[in-house]
Image (tube, rainbow, N blue to C red):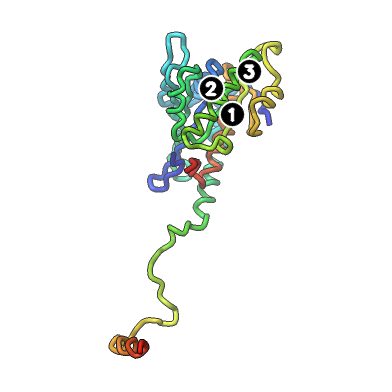
Amino acid sequence: MSVVNYGTREITCKIVYYGPGRSGKTTNLQHVYSQLPEDRKGKMVSLATETDRTLFFDFLPLDLGTISGFATRFQLYTVPGQVYYAATRKLVLQGVDGVVFVADSQSRQLAENIESLQDLHANLADEGFDPRTIPLVMQYNKRDLPAGEISPIEELDETLNFRGVPYFAASAINGAGVFETLRSIASMVLSRLSAPAVKES
Amino acid sequence: MAADSRKGEEDDGGEFADFMADISQEIAQRVESLATAPKAPSEVSKGTPVPADGGLILEWENVADRMIEDMR
């Protein structure tokens, strides 16, 4: 995806929230949406099942207005975490500029986190991206749960963050860590404005 | 590099304003650095260079004769 367009003077960044089912990806977007001032609130599109789990994807367009003469838009997407929506996850990853991996901090969810991370890497590679270099931020969500139910941050990071990318403790349901995560991935994506060719040829 | 965890409801919408401020500054810096970066070779004018020493051919009528003479 072209990140900066000098012809139309637009900057568009696509950020995808990835992670296992029920890790809090949609909750991240819902918090961002809740914080938007009324005049910037577009429409958050969510396609959910009857049990409120993401069926296809969530889409939140963030119109940041004109910055330095460029109309700036961030497009935030989530993928469905359930294993059987593999095709949808690949589709959503097309043209991605940056990824937030939302891990579930619950100890019993560690295997699902690892499986989802492996799925992310495989899908990025399938879509022609280099999983070792694409902008990535880790978010360890649900830190509000009792200490006995969640893994220590250090343990999660040791297991999941082998690239050593920035990571954030979060409780998306309370809003904690959500904007810190978004700011970090946005910064990483923007730092690559001069090098938009993230796809391998 | 773990982030500090602030409760979202405490600052009631200020989070987006802070985010905007940071991002605006970052974009402004990036746009400025890109604008001052040297142009890529493909963007450089490809017009025919004219030698500064006046390498213009003024005596066209003699050129063909000289070329034939040089080839002999």
Comes first in the chain, label 2 or label 3 = 2
Chain letter of disc 2 in the image: A
Measured from the top left, where is residue B39 in percent x and y?
48, 57
Q: Please name the residue that numbered disc 2 is placed on.
A: A28
Instruction: Please state if A175 lies on the left or on the right of A47 as rendered.
Output: right
Badge 2, how many Cα within 10 Å: few under 14, some, many 20+? Answer: many
**Would you say the residues marked 2 and 3 are in contact, meaning their CB atoms lie under 8 Å apart?**
no
The answer to the question of whether label 2 and label 1 lie on touching residues, with beta carbons closer than 8 A, is: yes
- Name the residue beneath numbered marker 1: A181
Q: Which mark is residue B35?
A: none
The residue at which mark 3 appears reads as: A110
Q: Quadrant of residue A87?
A: top left
Q: Secondary structure at mark 2?
A: helix
Q: Total marks drawn?
A: 3
Residue closer to the observer: A179 or A197? A197
Q: Does mark 3 fall on the same chain as mark 2?
A: yes
Instruction: Of the two numbered discs 1 and 3 on the same chain, state the one appearing first in sequence.
Output: 3
Residue at x 47%, y 43% (from the top left corner): A201
Residue sitting farthest toward the left: B61
Q: In percent of the image, x 37 and y 88: which residue is there?
A: B70
Rendered position, A154 above or below A164: above
Give above or below for A132 relative to B44.
above
Amino acid of disc 1: Thr
Q: What is the C-alpha distance between the residues marked 2 and 3?
A: 20 Å
Tell me the SS state at disc 1: helix
Q: Quadrant of the C terminus of chain B?
A: bottom left
